[in-house]
Image: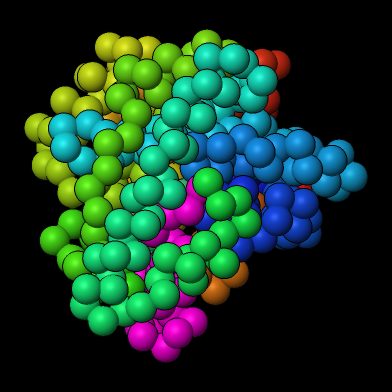
Amino acid sequence: MAKLDLHCHSTASDGALPPDELVARAAARGSRMLALTDHDCTAGLALARQAAEQAGLDLINGVEISVSWQKRAVHIVGLDINPDCPALVAGLHSVREGRVERARRMGEALAKIGIHGAFDGALQRCGNPEMIGRTHFARFLVDSGEVKNVAAVFRKYLVKGKPGYVAHEWATLADAVSWIRQAGGIAVIAHPGRYEIGRMLMEQLVEDFKAVGGEAIEVVSASHTLDQSHKFALLAARMELLASAGSDFHAPGEGGRDVGLTANLPPICVPVWSRFSPPRATPSAD
Ligand code: AMP
Ligand code: MN
Ligand code: MN
Ligand code: MN
């Protein structure tokens, strides 16, 4: 395992732990480098940094931007960003706008099939009301005994074609990458294995992404099998993309991996952290 994790969430978006507890948890597990990448929001970074200084952990400023590409949602992580960059701040603000209205519509859609109080229930589970999203609805439905776990709620209610799904227009790929670059960061295609697209569309996504200044792809992700990691390592090498690694941790016991450590990148990869400013070495296994 590598003692780093470049993708995780706090209560500033849809994670269950406050930023300082998240950092402390990663440090306690032996992590040396952590990027906090909340959805569409950088509000958790200041508290995370305080905790990282105490724990002696290298905190990388990050964000995960929701993008609409070819009528589907794609997530673009920004790493080593300046969170105060005005273009990024304004861009993220524009992406967050509309989440509350979308959530109201999700609540109405669920009410139509007999599930009442979902909007209020989701809002209560939100650390940051403007960041209300599907995960908060999923936790409400689990807590109310409706469904056994978050993954099952998504399958049953919250994905395209299911009764609680509400289509939404996120940022464009070009805008998201441009905000990250203006903030001095590196744009990364998050969890590519999660998009239900074939080889041709994946190539198209990478080409479109590179054409607007994208530079990296998550090769190691808790959403990936070992086979997928190897497949994306080859894709990264062939398309000359840097490689990233992240847990996409949201909450203890909520599926996926715990925070702080990730599988080693295949040796063919050029690690994204070798291009941070200043460049970082892979944290040693001491
Ligand atoms: P939203 O931005 O509101 O559309 O919510 C997206 C979030 O929902 C993702 O970041 C994940 O945390 C979560 N999510 C999406 N699909 C699933 C799934 N199939 N199972 C569990 N969580 C999911
Ligand atoms: Mn999430
Ligand atoms: Mn994501
Ligand atoms: Mn994520």
**Secondary structure mostly seen in the magenta stretch:** helix
Q: Does the image show residue 33?
A: no
- Residue under the image location 51 percent in, 30 percent down: 93
Magenta highlight on residue 145: yes
- Residue under the image location 29 percent in, 50 percent down: 194
Quarter of the rendering containing residue 81: top right
Task: Pick the residue in front: 225 or 193.
Answer: 193
> At which x and y percent is residue 184?
58, 13
Q: How many marks?
A: 0
Task: Pick the residue in front: 238 or 4.
Answer: 4
Q: Give the magenta part as a residue range.
A: 131-151
> At which x and y percent is residue 228?
29, 49
> At which x and y percent is residue 209?
29, 21
Q: Does the image show residue 166?
A: yes
Task: Pick the residue in front: 236 or 90.
Answer: 90
- Residue under the image location 43 percent in, 80 percent down: 142
Quarter of the rendering containing residue 70: top left
Q: Is residue 138 left or right of residue 12?
A: left
Task: Pick the residue in front: 159 or 164.
Answer: 164
Quarter of the rendering containing residue 62: top right
